[in-house]
Image (cartoon, grey):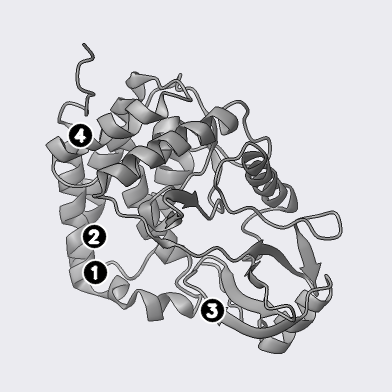
Amino acid sequence: MQKFNFDHLTPDFMWQALLSIGVRAESGLLALNSYENRVYQFSDENQQRYVVKFYRPQRWSDAQLLEEHALALELVEAEVPVVAPLVINGTTLHQYQGSYFTLFPSVGGRQFEVDNLGQLESLGRYLGRLHQVSLSDSFIHRPTMDLNEYLYQSREQLQNNSAIPRHLENAFFGDLDVLISAIESQWPNDVVIGRLHGDCHPGNILWRNDAPVIVDLDDARNGPAIQDIWMLLNGERADKMMQLDILLEEYQQYCDFDNNQLKLIEPLRGLRLVYYMAWLNRRWQDPAFPLAFPWFGEDKYWEGQVLAFKEQIALLNEPPLTLAPQW
């Protein structure tokens, strides 16, 4: 586990960091919901609202952060509604006393409604435009989604986790290994990859001026296009198939989609399931995590994960989702 916290981020430290790039915070420095990094909203002397993100050390390299920023700026240039970092003094990445940070415009909006079919149609169009730009190239410095990082490294981390109740260890790792084998058997070697948002769930989408605004490319990486689509599906199988039809009909007005990638939805869901609990374990020494996720150390949580493994294995054994026939 990485033993690190953000205790040095006092209001005075942040004020001085912003002043070092010529920005004077006059009010705010209100903490926003973020665990991996630390994010604050504030207003400057002209009542202009901003968001400043202080990055977790040693998570991404300078080159990886700048690649994320470059993609966001490229998308904005193509009129794709994403929130991109501001270029100040010729760069988007700044450093103050060893801490890296970036400034963004503060963008308001309502929560994206996953069950609103009109909003889903609009999002499909904008995701198609996003991928039209992003999938035209691949990241050089940022990683590619693979089984090693998401499954094998995560399993090793969980193996060293004393929080797993001893009486559940055999069942937990037995079912985890079955899940890993099921994902391995369905993971292709020839999937087409490109630059992705990487974490395109409804919480990273705002609804503003009758259109979606996509935020937080912090997890951007190379991977298959379906990774930016499957987390928007919810409900029963019939619901998900209808949502897929709506999303992809609009998406394909701007970007081609390989229907073979539908077979990756459940393997990708399995990867996220394992990676998420390993992420919590990896960050547990950050004081924000026990406060935000107190259930992580409880027997009930780990019993639930054993059940989640079984449910995901069952989903992997079902036929993949399909699109409605086109007439």
N-term mark: 4 or 1: 1
Question: In the image, is residue 3 above or below residue 306?
Answer: below
Judged from the image, the secondary structure of the residue bearing numbered disc 2 is: helix
Front residue of this view, candidates 279 and 173: 279
N-term mark: 4 or 2: 2
Q: Indicate the amino acid at tag 2.
A: Glu
**What separation in Å lies between label 2 and label 3 (alpha carbons)?**
37 Å
Q: Which mark identifies residue 31? A: 3
Check the image and name the residue furthest to the front: 209
Residue that label 1 marks: 165
Q: Residue at horizontal 72%, vertical 58%? A: 86
The location of residue 48, given as percent across then percent down, is 68, 73
Question: In the image, is residue 148 above or below residue 302?
Answer: above
**What separation in Å lies between label 4 and label 2 (alpha carbons)?**
39 Å
Residue that label 2 marks: 169
The location of residue 208, given as percent across then percent down, is 45, 56
N-term mark: 2 or 3: 3
N-term mark: 3 or 1: 3
Q: Indicate the amino acid at tag 4.
A: Met
In the rendered image, which quarter contains the C terminus? top left
Q: Which mark identifies residue 213? A: none
